[in-house]
Image (cartoon, coloured by chain):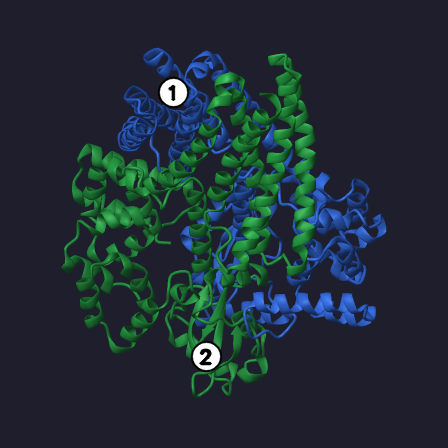
Chain colours: A green, B blue
Amino acid sequence: MSEPQTRLELEHLAQALRAVRARLAERRSPEELRAELERLHPADAAFVLESLPPEERLALWKLVPPEREGEILLELSEAVRDSLIATMDSKALVAAAEALEADEIADLAPDLPEEVIEDVIRALPQEERERLRAAMSYAEGTVGALMDFDQVTVREDVTLEAVTRYLRRMDELPNHTDQLFVIDREGKLRGTLPLARLIVSDLAAEVRTVMVPESVKLHPEESAEEAARAFERYDLVSAPVVDHFGRLIGRLTVDAVVDHIREKSAEAQLAEAGLSGEEDIFASAWASFRNRWSWLAINLVTAFVASRVISIFEGSIERLAALAALMPIVAGIGGNSGNQTITMIVRALALGQIQPGYWPKLIAKELGVATLNGVIWGGMLGAVTWAIYGNAALGGVMALAMLLTLLLAAGMGVAIPYVRARLARDPALGSSVLITACTDSGGFFIFLGLATLLLL
Amino acid sequence: MSEPQTRLELEHLAQALRAVRARLAERRSPEELRAELERLHPADAAFVLESLPPEERLALWKLVPPEREGEILLELSEAVRDSLIATMDSKALVAAAEALEADEIADLAPDLPEEVIEDVIRALPQEERERLRAAMSYAEGTVGALMDFDQVTVREDVTLEAVTRYLRRMDELPNHTDQLFVIDREGKLRGTLPLARLIVSDLAAEVRTVMVPESVKLHPEESAEEAARAFERYDLVSAPVVDHFGRLIGRLTVDAVVDHIREKSAEAQLAEAGLSGEEDIFASAWASFRNRWSWLAINLVTAFVASRVISIFEGSIERLAALAALMPIVAGIGGNSGNQTITMIVRALALGQIQPGYWPKLIAKELGVATLNGVIWGGMLGAVTWAIYGNAALGGVMALAMLLTLLLAAGMGVAIPYVRARLARDPALGSSVLITACTDSGGFFIFLGLATLLLL
């Protein structure tokens, strides 16, 4: 942190934000504004930039010194980052990227123009260049894409005394160095030496005798999600990343894991509501439209299918218009209850809690819940329908349709993730759209079909 | 970690799970099974228990030695934890709790019977008892509820040499000790001494000259969410928690923060689908019903209101049954687009990115997106309606109703969080239900109303 800070950050940020906006409004000298910026942590500067409307944002960005641009770009949300990168020329981008470490450049790379990346690669020293190439080669969502290269390594046949002297020669240990990595001549990981152990142990002892010989090891192609779960489960601060020969190639730290978890959780929340990605709140209507259109298009298709199902029964509706008023209740409750089932099952699948033999038990239980819901809510709605329309048969149809739709929702709520897990597809993807499509069309069909059969 | 482990945990867990199940199936001797359990990290044992059906789960739980029961209970999901606690008598519960530290007992306390807590408190030494009382006094979701008491403290007027000697006398430093806390005679926090600094500094120096005098400080009543954001933003491993006099009373560590973030994100996902809490996948149908009923009841009410809106227009529907088939499309797309708007705004509010003066801009932008959507999708649907029903006027009503409903959705999508933020309510709570209720009833009313006015 670059600035003394005695209270929690949100308050401090609100204050920083007000100060910067006030300066911009007063058109104070750029020097004053620059000094203000200088005092902010990169994450805080990014926050201020995200919270400003486009013109003010750009004015402020122009005041950021080139050597700080890279670290601030890293902290920005993708939408805002892209908008700022679009205003920078190649030279400025190369300068910003060069101030970063290999793993950080790799994080920015997808948003940079090709020729900028080539220039940056050319300007890097040999070792950094290879690291950048390695980091860029791993797919998003893997350990390789999150790891850094700031590991401190020692040999196992030296004394703790020697290790301590070696560390003293460094001015500062890299962030999140809670352990040193012990490697042999070929670079293979032999174990780890936690700082906490180094400090409490006898300095005359050899590393070999003090180190932890076996610990969680990650491989760069493993999924970041699994790694995050290991960090969570075993309360890790850092973990070594090794290649297939067991050679140490980097490390993963808890801050990268926390960022990953937050990002995934934000993405899930946004996807749930049908947003393809994080949105700059000041984005143009057109940019927002593009971020949102695909979900609306999919829903339009499923709503259209449901509408065609209803149209089969237009004759029945003409004769008993009450059906039109009642049918959305059946379809709606079916959709809600199907979503409950599918969410529960997708979650248990993601946590690895469902063994192959458990499916019959799950379906039995869900059908049980659906029956309970159907009898209780269906009975209640049937009675209300009877009371409103004075038509006992219509009430009966309502209750029966409700029960059957809830059973359908429960069945599909288990079947959809089951089939997708069997086909080795991600069972979470679009599960809400699928179940709602089933329960909408199914609910309308069941209710209107029963009414046609039994009432008309 | 209690067991050597060379690959990532999920694989290892699946294996452990299979092994334990095989033993249970073969009805091997409890000794063998107990040995198997013994080798598992508490988090892994909890995972195995969660993944077993009730009878096997209980059989396995009976084999857990009393001194490990506490640490495993801590790792279990609430639903499964409750089911196991229900099978234990007071004596066993007191024994399990006594093996834990004060902050851990406080985590379990809400699930324990009153008399067990009293017994545990009575059995604790004075200092632990006060800590437990303190920890239990903080509301869920505050820093106080997440903090622990494992901070290592030093004075500022001693040399690093003396600090090192002091640490050596401890067998082991507490987990996540990345820094020592420097306090004065009154227990007031003076600064922090990162281990990484301690190691690279001259041992003759005094703590005062090496420590970081100012750093992030938390207060126990601050929100855990804000603290998590500070950890994320400033990449912290631990942070001191101080009272209003500046006295150090505990610390917050990144593992507690990660657990908190995960829990919140899981809760949000479950709440989104209308589940009140984490569900044991093997719960009885009745227990599941109770976890899910409130959401269904709320939706039943809103669906019922929408149904009453439709019933106003039963006369129109009798005359033109196509209206019944088309109306769910309008209401559905309105709901989807309203959810997109409200999610984006609630998120920006939560991140503190919306300044008071920004609201007019936001509403203008959302109305712009709605107009784009209305013209594009409304036009398309209007044309399709015309083609299917050969009725140009009906197509026109469809297109116009779509546009108006999308504008309503955008307006409500901004207005609902605005009003709630103004009233200092949590703008996220139930926002999806509220907006869907508005767009359903509103969409039906707009479409059927326009059709009645213009067509009949």
Give the quadrant of residue B212.
Answer: bottom left
Which residue, given by chain and number where applicable, does mark 2 sit on? A244
What secondary structure is marked by label 2? loop
Please tell me which residue lies in front, A143 or A393. A393
Give the number of the disc on residue A27: none
Q: Is residue B205 above or below residue B406?
A: below
Please, which chain is the residue tagged with disc 1 on?
B
Please, which chain is the residue tagged with disc 2 on?
A
Amino acid type of the residue tagged 1 in the rendering: Phe
Q: Is residue A402 above or below residue A324?
A: below
Viewer can see residue A205: no
Residue B282 as seen in the image, left or right of residue B443: right
Amino acid type of the residue tagged 2 in the rendering: His
Please tell me which residue lies in front, B236 or B295. B295
Q: Residues under labels 2 and 1: Cα distance?
A: 63 Å
Q: Is residue B308 above or below residue A345?
A: above
